[in-house]
Structures are given as C-alpha cells and as structure tokens.
Amino acid sequence: MLEINVHNETSRLEAVVLGLPDDFGGTPKVEECYDPKSREFVLKGLFPNQQSIIEEMNAVLNVFIKYDVKVYRPENIPSLNQIFCRDIGFVIEDKFIIPNIISDRSDEVDALAYLHLQIEEGSIINMPENTRVEGGDVMLCNEYVFVGYSEAQDFEKYQVSRTNKAAVEFLQIAFPNKQIKGFELNKSDINPRENALHLDCCFQPIGNNSAIIYKDGFKNLSDVDFLTDYFGAKNIIFITKDEMYQMNSNVFSISPQVIISEKNFHRLNDELRKRGFTVEEVPYAEISKMEGLLRCSTLPLRRR
C-alpha cells in the first residue's frame, strides 16, 4: 500500500505527484479558458507550446531526482491539460481527499485512480456533493489548515471562485483536531492582476516559521493581520502585485531549507538566500502563463 502523510508545506518531501506535460491539448480557444491569465496569453498569441512545457517540468523532475524524492505521475489522458495536479486531490495527515472541482477539469481526477487503489480504503475521503474545493486553496500549517474560499455572493458570481464555504465547514468536521481557518480571496474573471485564483497564488508558508504573502490577494485585511501575527512580520516576505502576477508565492518546498523557485524571481530568490534557504532555480515562466506554477503542479503524498 502507498503510505501517505502530510502535516505542513515544508517538512522533508518523500513522495509527490508531479503533473504530466506530455499531451496537454495545445492552445485552447478563448471561450475554453477558465482563468484570466490563460485567456490573456491566448489573446496575445503567446500561450505556451508543448515542448516548452515538457522542458520546464523535466527541470522540476530532475530536482526531485537530485533529492531522492519518489515521483508519481498522472496517467495520460489524450489532449487534456494535466499539469496542475495540485487541485485534483490533496493529503491532510494520513487521509487523501478527493474534491469536487469545476466540470471543465473533472476528467483530470480519473488520472489518479491507480493511486487511489494503492491507498487504504479507509484513508480516502470523497468530499460531499455540495462542497467545492481545489487543492490550491488548501494550505497545511501544522495545527492549522488554511483554506482560501469565497462566500456565496462571490462563489456564484466568479468563474475563478473554486472553493465554497461548505468545503471549509466539511474539513472542520472531517479533521476536528485541526484548526480550519478560511480566508476570503479577491477574485476577477477578467484581470489576472486582481485575481487570487487560489490561496497559493497569494500566500505560502516556507521554512519552519516563515511565509510569502501578497496582502491584496485577501479580501479582508484582518486575515493579513492574523497571518502577520502568526508568523511574525520579520519572518514574512511581502510581494508586490506584479510579483503576485508572476506567481512568486507559488514556489515549492522540498524541506524547511530547500525551495524550488522560478529562475526569473530575482528579488525573491535573493531574499530567500539571504534568509538561509537553498534555492533550486528552474525555468517555469511558460507554465506560469496558465495561472499556475510550482505548487500548482505538485501534489505531496508523504513528508517526513
């Protein structure tokens, strides 16, 4: 059986699912885009091509090999974008949660069926039908599970609202020993610079007690105050609107000391090194055009 165990975002990674770039379906039509950044680059004629995506994801694969991480991949479904596997399942403690995601992406879940069969049946949780959640909105931080979500008025209004209040409430019932804290996020279907597609697009814990935060991704400044108090202002790297747009908060931790980051995040990477982190730089700028980056394309199964 496949052992799963995740309590936070930064403990030493032992097993992970890495998205699959081999047959992503090419450039979608504008009306087929379900996030504003993909739409922007389709309209510009600059949507990434197959070869660039393969090269970028292979760079991440090579980092995992370097650090002896066991890597699983989704099974290939022809002409389907399977890069952002974070959203189609996530692990909390020793439970694998299968969420209800938007219908445009529902076929992606089938690609992990072979993994579900390797996990003890009692360790799989299927989310109730009334809940909606994607893994990019679920952030583990030891005693806390932070969840980006939208209240009903935004959830029903925006295509980019992917997690509802019912999901937050269900996770609290499913994990009574955890503190489930929801953060409302700012949403825009048309402007990627005003849209926090998921929580990891504006926030991420790093190291043992640090974080990256984009303040204006949060609808309520009281939530930013909570996180500032929780981590301590000196332990937070605050990023700008442009850095958020470039996906600077969407890095990925292999351990408390090692972070995979996009090679063009010059200010962030320099700051991380100043704070004692080892930064494994990879090219990921093409994939970022689809409003996702390193955390979005990884699904941790086991951390030490």
Image: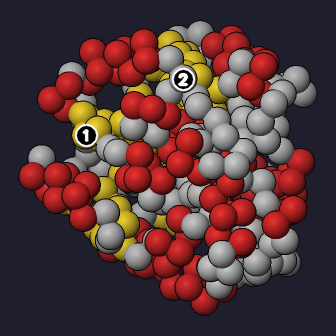
Task: Tell me residue 44's x, y (percent).
Answer: 66, 75
Image position of 118 (left or right of 46): right
Task: Tell me residue 285's x, y (percent).
Answer: 47, 72
Q: Give the residue at x 59% y 42%.
A: 195
SS for tag 2?
loop
Task: Tell me residue 163's x, y (percent).
Answer: 71, 31
Q: Which residue is mark 1?
A: 237
Q: Give the residue at x 45% y 58%.
A: 246
Local crowd at mark 1 within 10 Å, few (<14), some, or many (≥20)? some
Instruction: Say which quadrant the C terminus sits in.
Output: top left
**Rendered view: 11 above or below 157:** below
The three-letter amino acid code for the residue at tag 1 is Ile
Q: Nearer the viewer, residue 170 or 227?
A: 227
Q: Give the residue at x 82% y 54%.
A: 105
Of all residues, the one furthest to the bottom in this rendering is 51
Q: Which residue is mark 2?
A: 219
**Rendered view: 151 above or below 176:** below
**Rendered view: 123 above or below 52:** above
Task: Tell me residue 113's x, y (percent).
Answer: 80, 56
